[in-house]
Amino acid sequence: MASNFALFPERASTVAGEVDALYLFLVAVSGFFAVLIAALVVVFAIKYRRRAEDERPQAIHGSLALELAWTIIPFGLAMVMFFWGAKVYITLAVPPPNAMEVFVVGKQWMWKLQHLEGKREINELHVPVGQPIKLTMTSEDVIHSFYVPAFRIKQDAIPGRYTTAWFEPTKVGTYHLFCAEYCGTEHAKMIGRIVVMEPAEYQAWLAGTATTAVAAVPAAKPEDQQAAMAAAGAELFQKLGCVSCHRAQAGALGPSLAGLFGHNVALQDGSTVVADEDYIRESILNPQAKIVAGYQPIMPTFKGLVNEEQLMQLIAYIKTGKAGTETQ
């Protein structure tokens, strides 16, 4: 029904129907009680209006059935909203394990997107239909918000941390991309588009428009989606000298990064932290924030030496589990 309603954007993702159904339920419940309350106000104002100057209102005695009704029914509706909303939220928050990853950087006033294959785009994202897409995003300056109405997704891109969103397009076509967070005087110009293609067309587009830098990466293979971006991270890992300390061998000055991503890391203060994107980013830019147990706080900060895109390349490389192992 929603897809035929002019005020609704087109449904073009697997989660759009769930979001619309919950939204319409909330509107219907809110509308029902708004009309009910307004009608009762009018009825009671007429029925119980004061008819004479000396008239006094009659005492009202409680009704157990009525009190139970107006307690249990709203409680039940609130619980339905809560659990339904939680289900939709979890669906939107947890990408499928086979999702294809794309890195997104918001910047006044553009969206910079990079595929794991290395292809970079500005204010435009090409994706294949029927493929879950995971977006890992951050911002170079202020808070932006990645908003695609047709996919029913909206996620903030926040400076200094990573956020994620995902969608699975169901229709081939071109869809609007907006920034939904007022980010400056030219916020309205921060728009783009999502181009959904047939898988074969997408592969042809990807191969035909690969950048020179990506094509030059020797490790890139068609069957390895992470090869190009991870290879760029590996090159940067060597260039910055990270490999001199983070070696997968005894006596190294820094902890081994081999197989690190996604695992718990023991810290000097006795706590543990999961080695996710945010932890790795913080360790690169502010290495003294969380010192790994058994190691000295000697790592210098790389803040100002690497930009957001290079940080994502380093993370892509560490995700492969091979960081620091090639020099053994």
Image: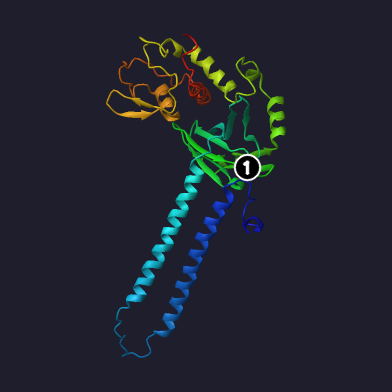
Q: Position of residue 9 (x, y in %)?
A: 63, 51
The location of residue 153, given as percent across then percent down, is 55, 45
Question: Whole-percent x and y of residue 120?
Answer: 62, 27
The residue drawn where x is 57% and y is 32% is 102
Quarter of the image that includes the N terminus: bottom right
Q: Residues within 10 Å of mark 1 (few under 14, many from 20)?
A: many
Displayed quadrant of residue 201: top right
* Residue 222, x across and y down, in percent: 65, 23
- Of residues 186 and 23, the one drawn nearer to the viewer in this rendering: 23
In the rendered structure, the answer to whether residue 258 lies left or right of residue 107 reads left
| Residue in the foreground of this view, choosing between 35 and 243 | 243
Quarter of the image for residue 180 reads: top right
Residue located beneath label 1 in the image: 169
Amino acid, disc 1: Pro
Report the side of 268 relative to 19 (left or right).
left
Residue for point 60% across, 29% down: 115
Q: How is the image coloured?
A: rainbow
In this rendering, position of residue 198 left or right of residue 224:
right
Residue at 44% x, 59% y is 80
Q: Secondary structure at mark 1?
A: loop
- Measured along the vertical axis of the image, is residue 179 above or below residue 71? above
Query: Exactly how many numbered labels are in the figure?
Result: 1
